Amino acid sequence: MQTPMAQPQGKLSEATYPALERKLRYQNALFPVRMETATHYKLLESAVIQARLDHENTTIRLVNGTTPYEGRIEVFTKGVWGSVTDYSYYPDRPLYNAIAAGLACRLLFGPGYGGSVVPKEEASVRFGVARGRAILMNNIVCNGNEKSLLDCQWSTTYTSTTLEDSLSVVCKTVPKGCNGYLEIATGNLTSPGYPQSTVYTTDTDCVWKIVNKVAKIRLSFTKVDFNGSTLTTSNRLEVFDSNGYLSLSSVTSSTNVTSSSSEIYVWLKVPAGSKGIQFHANWDAAPCFESISSSGYIRSPGYPQQYPTNLNCTYHLLKRRGLHASISFRNFALSNMVQGVCGDSLQVFDGDTEFSPSIRGPMCNTTSPATITTTNVNSTKVIVKFTSDAVNTSVENGFEAYFSSVEPDPIRPGNYTEDSGTFATPGYPSVYNGEEDVIWTITTKPYKTITINFHQVQLKGCCDDYITIYDQVRSTSYYGGNIPSFATDTNSVEVTMKSSLDNEMNVINASWITECRQVFTASSGSIMSPNDPTFDSASADCTYIIRQQPGYYIKLQFSTINFERDMRCSNYIEIHDGSTDLFPLLGERYCGQTLPPTLNSTQNIVLLKFGTQTGKNSFSLRYSSHPKECSSGLMKDIDGSFTSPGFPIGYPSNTYCVWTINLDQTKQQVELTFNDFSVGTQGTQCQYAFVRVYDAATVDASKVMATLCGTTLPPKLRSKGHNMTVVLNVFGSLTNANGFLATYAGRSPTEPYLYGIEHGDHTLETDPYKTAEVAIEDGFPFGDSLRDAVYFPLGGLVFFGRLESILGRLWRGLLSAGGAHVQSIANAFVEPAW
């Protein structure tokens, strides 16, 4: 344990000056105003004022620790103390938190101190959770050399942060040289005490930040010694890039690493009782070279600060063959041209070498150039050269540009509007080797949909060569093989073949047809027969599908119906309670001119068929969707069943249902069995949906029997009384869950409780906190030794094996001696009735 530091002389704690104020009031009331009393009063008054000033100058403290050297970090600003929190899901937080912890401890206790972050779960136990505190700083980012935590950067948005995310630390003395902020172009870095090795007395974190504002940093480790230790999470040497989360290297031996910009971090973690990892490293400015793949920014060294003199920088912009490169300038400020010559310049070469054609440059001055687009699709690289002379001027703040790989414009063979036709890759039946994507668009009349059939598909596959079909609602991609027929849900579809240069494989041949068919997914709307002069209502064959989310039913109300009369009802509309005409009819087949009644589906999908053979025929209707309601809430029969709303398709969003089983009249216990179960997702603390069972006639938090979710069938549950309550609680929208089917039956309190797969049970549960002891005089062979007593769970489970065996008879005798009700059931689980 660290020795507490002495209170600095002349300073008083926060709790001291109220006591001084009370003493002042006492002194003032007790003594007459004499010279010595006045002097004493003035001294006390000065002490109170000094205490207030010292308190107000303090901007950081640790709270709720058992020593002054640990606890949650709080800061004082704007007249209040508040919490420092950390949204630890960001990948850069561990490094930044380690820097903040070290800085906080140095500010509190001096330069010889460092700190380690206490994990959030451990901190809530050790230091509790702050209550009633404002969150003043979130996701703090420090360099490590600040004079106050308030000088660091932090966020003021706390959308996903709570006081449970408070940053907590343990402060400790650390070796000299542990931690540092090094803003210098070149230098050396060593582990504390190098080359000597000392044993660390505490778990230690040392973090160094190296900065070179005008160049990338090349860090070279020349010596790495583990001192006989091994690489672990608490014993490691790691280098992080300037973003704080990209690990450039977990250093185990001599190596070189280069930052992506002007900052680099080194983090040494050493466990207590070890010598840790010793190292020696040096750094300098990395060569002015950068390679960027596909897309990214290129910047002059030190941007947006003035770039150094005498630079010779090269940027390789990598792209795939067949693509163009685009370079757009965000800022541009180089030296001005003098007598037609650029002292500092930028030049772009459209090819793999600096001997490739120059497409722009040399460029200089302070006017941003227009966007550059290369034309050489056979190269895999664009080279950019940047040079500076020996003289700097005030305008030379450098450049920033964005590079991206660009596909060439696609080929569009046409926008097809015919009711049927074919399409194929350019040059079919030959292979299409072009880089340009090919896009076919097919559009038909509003009351029709399109079905595409693929007759030949041959694709290179993987990442650059594939087919995407998009009908404004769904997007589906295929990478080769047999592609099934695709029926759209709208009257328009776009088929795109992504292609790469010289693929040597891509071939497509397909056809399409249209049909009178519409799909409706809005929660309400109107449907009518086609209002088109070219549509022949005397020979209609149309289908309409209404599709809603699971757990909802559909209500249909006809506005008009006008069918040519005939005895056979050959001009009709019929509604099926499902997705195909194999599902039952809602009502009947309707014909003539009489409006059908309002119809309600039982499913979340209905199919309407509009068929005619003679005359002029038409109809119109409105539909709306509604969530299914919970089934009967109170059940008093001796047995019965119930389901979640919408079962087995799925329950509605934001559902809350309560079922109560009441067997007070028969004085029986309730045995509940889930015959089918798919609710929420297991392993996420049932955060999306759950079923909760209560051993009571109401929702009573003290009588929870089980909270269930997932897709595994739950165990049978039996109440202790004559009532049971079941609650389904769904948060948000449905997540691949069908709901449940449950049955219940009344059971006598003395009736054995049968468990096991043979009896329809799938999970075994025990009640471990209520047990009964059965003493055994001569000892019982339990495991490897004789037991003097055996403990059985009250209301729990005991496996007997085959009771006709010697061991089974011994168990039965043992339980009978203990007062248990035993029934001879082979390989069954029986509940002892103590």
Image (cartoon, grey):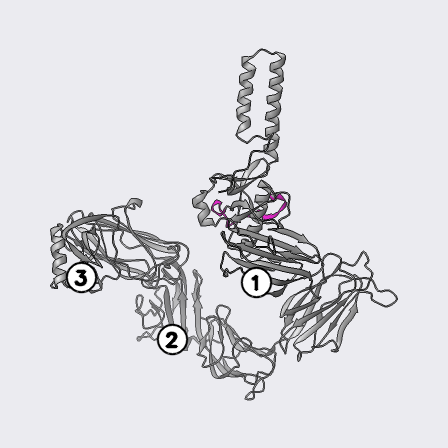
Mark 2 highlights which residue? 612
1 or 2: tag closer to the N-terminus: 1
Under circle 1, the secondary element is loop
Mark 1 → mark 2, Cα distance in angstroms: 79 Å
Choose mark 3 or mark 2, whichever is in front: 3
* Residue 396 % position (x, y): 78, 59
Left or right: residue 98 versus residue 725 is right
* Residue 756 % position (x, y): 21, 62
Under circle 3, the secondary element is loop
Q: Extreme front residue here? A: 196
Q: Residue at x 51, y 46 (%)?
A: 169
Q: From which residue to which does the magenta span run?
A: 149-165
Residue in the foreground of this view, choosing between 633 and 363? 363
- Residue 393, compared with residue 453, is above or below; it is above
Choose mark 1 or mark 2, whichever is in front: 1
Residue 319 location, quadrant = bottom right
* Residue 457 % position (x, y): 49, 83
Amino acid marked by disc 2: Thr
- Residue 492, compared with residue 784, is above or below; it is below
Residue 138 appearing in the image: no
Mark 1 → mark 3, Cα distance in angstroms: 59 Å
Q: Extreme bottom residue here? A: 429
Residue 628 appearing in the image: yes
Q: Residues within 10 Å of mark 2 (few under 14, many from 20)?
A: many
Mark 3 highlights which residue? 828
3 or 2: tag closer to the N-terminus: 2
Mark 3 → mark 2, Cα distance in angstroms: 64 Å
Choose mark 1 or mark 3, whichever is in front: 1
Amino acid marked by disc 3: Ala
Mark 1 highlights which residue? 251
Q: Residue at x 63, y 78 (%)?
A: 321
* Residue 473 % position (x, y): 49, 68
